Amino acid sequence: MTTVATGSSAEPHSSRLTVYAALAGNVAVACTKLAAAVVTGSAAMFSEAVHSIVDTGNEGLLLYGFRQSERRPNLVHPFGYGRELYFWSFIVALLLFGLGAGVSLYQGVRHVIDPEPIEYALVSYVVLGLSFVFEGASWIVAWRGFKRARGDLSFWRAFRQSKDPPAFMVLFEDSAALIGIAFAGAGIMAADFLDMPVFDGIASILIGLVLAITAGLLAIESKSLLIGERAPPALVEAICRLVEEQPGVANANSALTAQLSPHQSIVALSIEFEDGLMTDQIEDCVAGLEARVRAAHPDVVALFVKPQTLRQFESATRKRFGSYPIN
């Protein structure tokens, strides 16, 4: 017997606010850096301008992904469009690598081979200082949101376990931007004071490497979410405890889950019912536990129930995954 409960949860707006904050900061920074790059002729400044332009476009794509992921389910997409956000997050990572890192590396190598003197270095210093303030403000917003979401987990573990790409993408992009500004400032200063413009090209190459590493990390995590990750194990444990309190349930074996979006998941429960229950009693029991799960965990947009003994469940699990338990 299978039962499906569909619904939607009110998606928290913290990630979206983080993206809006980053978008506002990047628009201001991109315009400022681009003007300075034209005036000074600095490769590092041009790399930073490209980085900010790419980041601005990336924030726009993330906001588009938010909008698309909230579309209602239909017969063609019965579980909705939640993974649209994961798809566009993956595209953002590719753009950061292809455009941000690629252009920066190209400009850096070109200026190392054929160095050009920097003009109006003071303009670069002022622009980089303002950019650091703008990016720093955006970084603080992103860090606070990520810190609130990670709880007691370490930074790396929270990043790997996160189901919300925009939350860590903006933080990583802003961190890369701050590091890039530091490299650009150091390169321009060395080229200016030592009269060795090759340092400007070296700074651009370093910026490109930072962007490439950042993009690689974001792409790996976004791809994992896009092809399908399980929901947090804590959700399975909480649901099983809830189900075992339902009259008529002998044992909640476990569940298979899939994360559709940061705040949407599918759960397939394996349950052993008490002996002697009639069909209508099992149906009432399923309806009751369905209502309890929906009330306690509105992020579960689809719930499937499969009657199984624990032995049957363990056998099926070993056959599918090669081991037991699954969590």
Image (cartoon, rainbow, N blue to C red):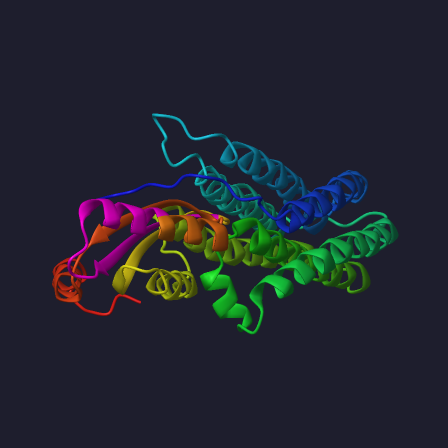
Looking at the rendering, the stretch of residues picked out in magenta corresponds to: 264-287
Left or right, 128 with reference to 258: right
Identify the residue at image location x=19%, y=54%. 277
> Residue 229's image quarter?
bottom left
Identify the residue at image location x=51%, y=52%. 215
**Rendering coords of residue 130 (x, y %):** 83, 52
Q: How many marks?
A: 0
Identify the residue at image location x=59%, y=62%. 149
Identify the residue at image location x=65%, y=59%. 175
> Residue 33's image quarter?
top right
**Rendering coords of residue 207 (x, y %):** 61, 56
Which quarter shows the N terminus? top left
Q: Is residue 237 above or below residue 122?
A: below
> Residue 250's image quarter?
bottom left
Residue 266 visible to an observer of this rendering: no
Which residue occupies the extreme top position in the image? 75
Closer to us: 101 or 105: 101
* Residue 254 forms part of the magenta stretch: no
Closer to us: 92 or 239: 239
Residue 291 visible to an observer of this rendering: yes
Left or right, 125 with reference to 51: right
Closer to us: 131 or 318: 318
Which quarter shows the C terminus? bottom left
Left or right, 256 with reference to 314: right
**Rendering coords of residue 43 (x, y %):** 68, 48
**Rendering coords of residue 222 (x, y %):** 44, 50
Closer to us: 165 or 77: 77
